[in-house]
């Protein structure tokens, strides 16, 4: 079974949530006998194919980027060439250029789309893109939603319910680097024994401005890991509010990130818009057995974090409610500990990379079998 993944960014150029999902998919299905290839765009010059954790990564030059839509003329030929050797082509949505490339490259292999998110911010561009989007989603063989919450609340997915199934994201803790005792001691000395943690790219929909407002009047250490387009304005807001308890530590390597996930008291994940369709960093918190705070935005975040069971769920864009949730966890260590245990148990039940890989492997083989059956039926009708 040969599967080609096509998305605008991937390792080693970028390590965001969708890239992590693709990585876990490739590693997990690879253990089941799937040969995976990833095609992505890159700003780098040396774009020779490379091997990464058992799969092959091909990159083509990124020529331009308009409203987060990465574009590459070279991608058309590369997609057409690599798709010829694939049994299944796996797209990752949203990426309007990827939709266009599917048609220009004339891909005619069984196809699946993982629907990571609705388009939320670029609503004025959505009107222009919608005909292409509808044609693309209508043309692929199968669509995958990442949670029942998103499936139920997405107006786009509601049009394609007959070919949409739910396969939740999954992680494999063994692929995370284990921090050395010295590294743990370093962070413990710097941050203290008890702190809230946020991990992620600093983007508009992450709700970090709400977290900063919620931190006013609290003396709890709050650690923000990550870099991104709104980093400067967040630091300006923290300075303006006089927050001495909020520490921006920037983008960290994987061992430091694992160290902070190991040490933190709880995970605060205040994303307030539907652009946050799932929350891989939130899922990492569950994997490390941490109680979580998240917002109810009708997406996978509330499938990961069950209010009152694995953590607390608050209304979006409500710093008072977020502050209250932080106070509740901080003042009740036994409650926080029990929620963390239940979060880890729920992760093991629903969100392992092994489960995700098994479900996708079944889908791939189902699509290939369906294609083979269709070819046989066509031959019988047409005749020799």
Image (cartoon, helix red, strand yellow):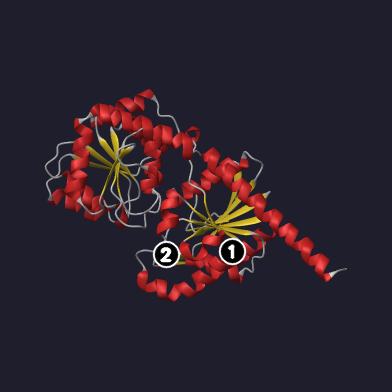
Quadrant position of the C terminus in the picture: bottom right
Question: Residue 75 falls in which quadrant of the image?
Answer: bottom right
- Is the C-beta separation of discs 2 and 1 under 8 Å? no
Question: What residue is pinned by disc 2?
Answer: 155
Could you tell me which residue is drawn at 19 percent across and 31 percent down?
331
Outermost residue on the top side: it is 181
Point out which mark residue 140 bears.
Answer: 1
Could you tell me which residue is drawn at 40 percent across and 39 percent down?
284
Q: Position of residue 234 (x, y in %)?
A: 22, 52
Q: Position of residue 270 (x, y in %)?
A: 28, 48
- Secondary element at image label 2: loop
Q: Position of residue 321 (x, y in %)?
A: 19, 47
**Residue 274 in view in this figure:** yes
Could you tell me which residue is drawn at 51 percent across and 70 percent down?
134
In this image, 53 relative to 202: left or right?
right
- Secondary element at image label 1: loop
Query: From the viewer's perspective, is the residue at label 2 or at label 1 nearer?
Result: 2
Distance from Cα at disc 2 to Cα at disc 1: 18 Å
In this image, 4 relative to 274: left or right?
right
Question: Residue 141 falls in which quadrant of the image?
Answer: bottom right
Closer to the camera, 376 or 217? 376
- Counting labels gives 2
Closer to the camera, 253 or 134? 134
In the image, residue 233 sits, relative to residue 156, either above or below, namely above
Earlier in the chain: of badge 2 and badge 1, it is: 1
In the image, residue 370 sits, relative to residue 284, either above or below, namely below
Point out which mark residue 187 bears.
Answer: none
In this image, 229 relative to 90: left or right?
left
Answer few, some or many: residues within 10 Å of disc 2's Cα (few below 14, many 20 plus, some between 14 and 19). Answer: few
Answer few, some or many: residues within 10 Å of disc 1's Cα (few below 14, many 20 plus, some between 14 and 19). Answer: some
Question: Residue 281 falls in which quadrant of the image?
Answer: top left
**Residue 193 in view in this figure:** no
């Amino acid at each position: 079974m040969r599967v080609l993944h096509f998305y605008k960014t991937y390792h080693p150029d970028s390590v965001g949530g969708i890239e992590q999902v693709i990585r876990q998919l490739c590693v997990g299905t690879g253990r089941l006998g799937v040969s995976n290839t990833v095609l992505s765009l890159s700003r780098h010059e040396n774009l020779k194919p490379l091997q990464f954790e058992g799969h092959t990564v091909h990159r083509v030059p990124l020529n331009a980027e308009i409203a987060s839509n990465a574009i590459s003329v070279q991608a058309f030929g590369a997609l057409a060439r690599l798709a010829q050797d694939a049994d299944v082509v796996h797209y990752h949505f949203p990426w309007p250029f990827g939709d266009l490339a599917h048609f220009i490259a004339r891909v005619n292999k069984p196809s699946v789309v993982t629907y990571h998110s609705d388009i939320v911010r670029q609503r004025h561009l959505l009107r222009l893109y919608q005909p292409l989007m509808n044609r693309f989603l209508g043309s692929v063989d199968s669509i995958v939603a990442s949670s029942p919450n998103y499936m139920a609340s997405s107006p786009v997915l509601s049009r394609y319910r007959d070919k949409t199934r739910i396969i939740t994201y999954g992680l494999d803790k063994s692929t995370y680097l284990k921090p050395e005792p010295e590294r743990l001691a370093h962070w413990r000395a710097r941050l203290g024994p008890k702190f809230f943690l946020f991990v992620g790219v600093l983007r508009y929909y992450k709700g970090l401005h709400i977290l900063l407002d919620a931190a006013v009047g609290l003396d709890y250490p709050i650690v923000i890991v990550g870099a991104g387009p709104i980093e400067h304005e967040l630091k300006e807001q923290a300075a303006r509010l006089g927050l001495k308890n909020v520490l921006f530590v920037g983008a960290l390597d994987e061992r430091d990130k694992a160290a902070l996930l190991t040490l933190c008291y709880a995970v605060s994940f205040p994303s307030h818009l539907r652009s946050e369709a799932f929350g891989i960093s939130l899922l990492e918190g569950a994997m490390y057995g941490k109680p979580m705070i998240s917002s109810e935005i009708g997406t996978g975040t509330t499938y990961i974090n069950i209010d009152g069971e694995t953590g607390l769920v608050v209304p979006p864009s409500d710093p008072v409610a977020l502050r209250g949730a932080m106070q509740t966890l901080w003042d009740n260590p036994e409650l926080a500990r029990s929620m963390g245990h239940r979060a880890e148990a729920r992760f093991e039940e629903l969100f392992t990379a092994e489960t995700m890989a098994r479900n996708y492997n079944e889908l791939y083989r189902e699509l290939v079998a369906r294609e083979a059956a269709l070819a046989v039926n066509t031959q019988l009708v047409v005749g020799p």
